[in-house]
Image (cartoon, helix red, strand yellow):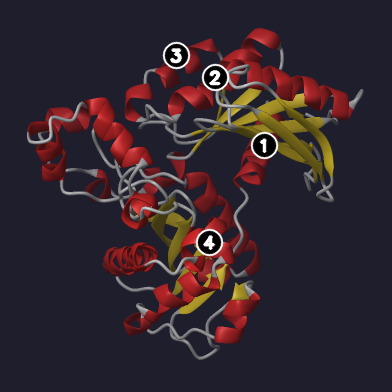
């Protein structure tokens, strides 16, 4: 396809829709980025141009917009900003692709039905991912939509890395380890293949550390193991999620505390993690600035669990050549990086404090046996690249 125009990327969460508009050319320069946040509790739209200047902003009353309405507003705002420049396609982040969807796919109503069937595997993510898809199918059915999956990157993992020790009928039903943040890991891996190919083809542990956090072990640029499993609750301590938890705790909460399934879900997704341990905030910046002991304990637990999981992934890889930090905390928090790498000295990594403070590229000493790096992620750009490739092949 040689037509010129724009690609719109939508990344829908439970209370927000992030979006970005890219040129359709090979380089795919970004034209605008924005989001509607606080959907359902006071929606707020903000759009910035490529230079970071705010070019549009709007607020609504509390429950004025749901995800379908927010999508309509984004379409209208995008049309106004782009004037006569055509939109060629939409690319979507879809959290769960199950075992079937291992690569980006063009969406039709049959595909939507198949993805909707995966909602029980990601009940707090999948419905919101699919809401903009349905809205665009109704408003502009002639425009291509491409679904890009957070689980797809991890389908290269060995079967042993994907299985739980449960009866086979449950595994066949889809109760297995999937792994998430795959679009981020995919972007980081491809960026390293372009800048540090030898490193990218080695044994890496990539740390996607943000409000949601996970680790992924890669070898030859392919996922070998990850800390997230059946859901995005598993693995590391996160902003409001507990991470790995003894299943017996859930039995205790239900049997002894009389908690309902919805109350347990709320506890594990929204009231645990850094917020639950600190009792202060889910934001690492707030905790770093606090003098409260509970804030320090939350940070220490966050770091401890990461270091411990790095050890587990090092075993899965049979050794480590590099550790890569990405996402909000990973890219911007020098103190957290330093504390994690201090716990990994046994692997042979030696931090360079000046490089770490500078916050870019290699942050380990030149003579470090295991190198450490910062590679900024860009999930929206990864989705745009996949959407562009899908258009070119259609």
SS assignment at label 3 = helix
For the residues marked 3 and 4, what is the alpha-carbon distance in whole angstroms? 41 Å
Return the x and y of residue 243 as percentages of the image width and height: 30, 50
Mark sitting earlier along the chain (1/3): 3
Residue 141, visible in the rendered structure: no
SS assignment at label 1 = helix
The answer to which of 239 and 219 lies nearer the viewer is 239
Quickly name the residue at label 2.
131
For the residues marked 4 and 1, what is the alpha-carbon distance in whole angstroms? 38 Å
Mark sitting earlier along the chain (4/1): 4
Mark sitting earlier along the chain (2/1): 2
Quickly name the residue at label 4.
285
For the residues marked 1 and 3, what is the alpha-carbon distance in whole angstroms? 24 Å
Return the x and y of residue 216 as percentages of the image width and height: 40, 57
Quickly name the residue at label 1.
389
For the residues marked 2 and 3, what is the alpha-carbon distance in whole angstroms? 12 Å
Quickly name the residue at label 3.
113
Mark sitting earlier along the chain (3/4): 3
Point out the frontmost of discs 4 and 2: 4
Point out the frontmost of discs 1 and 3: 3
Point out the frontmost of discs 4 and 1: 4
The answer to which of 81 and 361 lies nearer the viewer is 81
Report if the CB atoms under discs 4 and 1 are less than 8 Å apart.
Answer: no
Point out the frontmost of discs 2 and 1: 2
Point out the frontmost of discs 2 and 3: 2
Residue at point 10%, 39% (across, down): 252
């Amino acid at each position: 396809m040689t037509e010129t125009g724009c690609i719109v990327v939508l990344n829908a969460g439970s209370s927000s829709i992030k979006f970005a508009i890219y040129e359709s050319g090979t380089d795919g320069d970004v034209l605008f980025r924005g989001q509607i946040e606080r959907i359902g509790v006071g929606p707020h739209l903000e759009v910035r141009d490529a230079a970071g200047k705010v070019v549009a902003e709007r607020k609504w009353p509390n429950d004025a917009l749901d995800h379908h309405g927010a999508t309509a507003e984004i379409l209208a705002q995008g049309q106004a900003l782009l004037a006569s420049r055509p939109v060629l396609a939409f690319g979507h982040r879809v959290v769960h692709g199950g075992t079937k969807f291992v690569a980006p796919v063009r969406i039709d109503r049959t595909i939507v039905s198949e993805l909707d069937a995966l909602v029980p595997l990601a009940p707090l993510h999948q419905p919101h991912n699919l809401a903009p898809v349905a809205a665009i199918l109704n408003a502009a059915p002639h425009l291509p939509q491409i679904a890009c999956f957070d689980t797809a990157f991890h389908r290269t993992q060995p079967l042993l890395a994907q299985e739980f020790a449960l009866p086979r009928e449950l595994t066949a039903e889809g109760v297995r380890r999937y792994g998430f943040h795959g679009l981020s890991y995919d972007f980081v891996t491809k960026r390293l293949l372009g800048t540090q190919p030898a490193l990218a083809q080695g044994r890496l542990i990539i740390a996607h550390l943000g409000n949601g956090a996970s680790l992924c072990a890669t070898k030859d640029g392919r996922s070998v193991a990850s800390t997230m499993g059946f859901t995005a609750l598993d693995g590391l301590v996160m902003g409001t999620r507990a991470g790995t938890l003894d299943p017996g705790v859930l039995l205790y909460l239900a049997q002894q505390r009389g908690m309902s399934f919805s109350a347990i879900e709320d506890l594990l997704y929204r009231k645990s993690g850094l917020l639950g341990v600190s009792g202060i905030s889910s934001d690492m910046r707030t905790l770093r600035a606090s003098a409260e002991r509970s804030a320090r304990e939350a940070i220490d637990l966050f770091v401890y669990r990461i270091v411990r999981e790095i050890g587990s992934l090092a075993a899965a890889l049979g050794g480590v050549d590099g550790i890569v930090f990405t996402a909000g905390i990973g890219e911007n928090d020098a103190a957290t990086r330093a504390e994690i790498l201090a716990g990994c000295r046994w692997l042979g990594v030696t931090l360079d404090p000046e490089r770490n403070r500078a916050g870019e590229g290699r942050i380990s000493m030149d003579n470090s046996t295991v190198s450490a790096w910062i590679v900024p992620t860009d999930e929206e750009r990864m989705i745009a690249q996949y959407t562009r490739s899908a258009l070119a092949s259609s």
